[in-house]
Structure formats: structure tokens, C-alpha cells
Amino acid sequence: DGGITQSPKYLFRKEGQNVTLSCEQNLNHDAMYWYRQDPGQGLRLIYYSQIVNDFQKGDIAEGYSVSREKKESFPLTVTSAQKNPTAFYLCASSFRQGGINIQYFGAGTRLSVL
Amino acid sequence: AQSVTQLDSQVPVFEEAPVELRCNYSSSVSVYLFWYVQYPNQGLQLLLKYLSGSTLVESINGFEAEFNKSQTSFHLRKPSVHISDTAEYFCAVSPSGAGSYQLTFGKGTKLSVIP
């Protein structure tokens, strides 16, 4: 089945620790995205990547890092510099159809701080 | 830049009653409009989209939304809700220029269907 797979579903971080969230897609989409969702805040863009080996900061990139070494994969690292990491993280990918990017989402990873 | 306002954070409604979830947007350029639905502890699913053409768009599960350019609105409606419609609904807007990767979301509206 084609889709976007995020793992793990739940993740716990200790103080001073970096953690990495996985996002894999087999939809052959060129672009991939990471969003952070907090209750009552909607979704905020962390990073996005239009092509392999290239990515751009979104609205709240501080304390996060990404890589895009393969078209299928766009992992997100939450660094120790992110002081409030507890949130639901959503990965998305999109394809271009007639100049329009339609975004599709994974099931999310819930990150909590121990 | 674009912004999206969802006027109601929570909407309770009885089963089989009609519902309207309101969405207004602000943009200096033409836009595409989307509604996504999120069930508890899941990702977002695309419910419907307005790209061009008819201002009334429909989903396969009975929802519809109407693009009103003069009022900069894209309200979501359903004539008769089911328990299974309980979820959070997000309105989103994207500039219609070619190559845009930006998608701006509203803060969401939680729809609770009461038996």
C-alpha cells in the first residue's frame, strides 16, 4: 500500500537528549514537510524539502534539524536546544498536479519529555 | 502572507442535525482552499479542496464547502451529521501561484456529535 509512515508512534525524550523522528513515503512525492501540532494551535511548519539534498526552514525551525538524503525519507531531529518539545509531530508529502501541491499526511508521532 | 481564521474552536451538535464549520481567510493573492479532518491520535486526511471552477465542492461522505471570494470564506457544511463525524476539522489556504509549497492552517474546530 502506498502511504506515509511515521515512526515511532510515541517517543519520550530525556533532558539534554536529541531524538529523531522517522518519516518514509512510497508515493514518489518530490516534496516533504514536518509540522508541529499543539492543542488549539493548529499546525505550524518546521521544515520542508522540495528535492533531495535541499530543505528550507519553516516558521518554527529553531531547535530542530532535518536531512533529505533520499527521496523517500525526511527524518526530523529534535535537539536539546528545543526547550518545549512536547507535541504531536506530523510529516506530509506532496506531488505537483497542474502547478498545485496537494499535501498528504502520516499518522503522526507524539513526543513527550520525561 | 496568508492567514486563516476558524471562528469556532468547538461545535457540539446532535446526531442527524445540520452543521456548519466556519472558515475565513486573508490573502493578498489568489488562493487554493482545503479542508482536512483529523480523527483522535491520527494524521490529517484531505476532505475536500477548492482549486478553481465551481465554487461549491463536495466530499464523498456528504460534506460540502462553498468558496465565497467576496466574503473570503470557505465554510464547511453537512446537512445531517453522524457519530462518526466527530473529529477536528482544519481549514487551510495556499497561494495559487505555480510552485508554492506554503500551506497555512487555521487552529481547528472540534466537532462533537451528540447521540
Image (cartoon, helix red, strand yellow):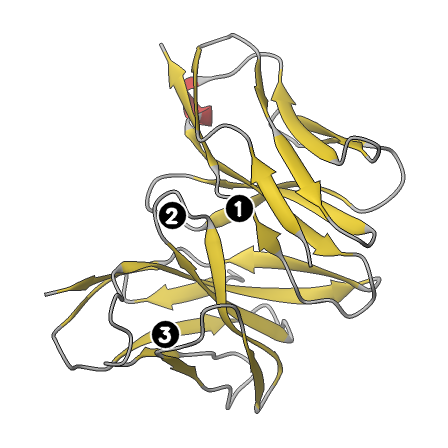
Q: Toward which corner of the image does residue A94 lie, by quadrant? A: bottom right
Q: Examine the rendering and report whether any part of residue B79 can be seen.
A: yes
Q: Position of residue B34 (x, y in %)?
A: 66, 44
Asked whether B30 or A23 is in front, the reply is B30
**Do the residues indicated by labels 1 and 3 lie within the same chain of the protein?**
no
Q: Which residue is mark 2?
A: B42
Crowd rating for badge 1 (residues with CA inside 10 Å; few <14, some 14–19, many 20+): some
Question: Is residue B61 shown left or right of residue B11?
Answer: right
C-alpha distance separating marks 3 and 2: 16 Å
In the image, residue B62 above or below residue A7: above
Q: Which residue is mark 3?
A: A22
Kindly indicate whether the residue at mark 2 contacts the one at mark 1 (C-beta within 8 angstroms): yes
Q: Secondary structure at mark 2?
A: loop
Q: Secondary structure at mark 3?
A: strand
In the image, residue A96 above or below residue A41: below
The chain identifier of the residue carrying mark 1 reads B
In the image, residue A7 above or below residue A51: above
Q: Looking at numbered disc 3 in the image, what kind of residue is underneath it? A: Ser
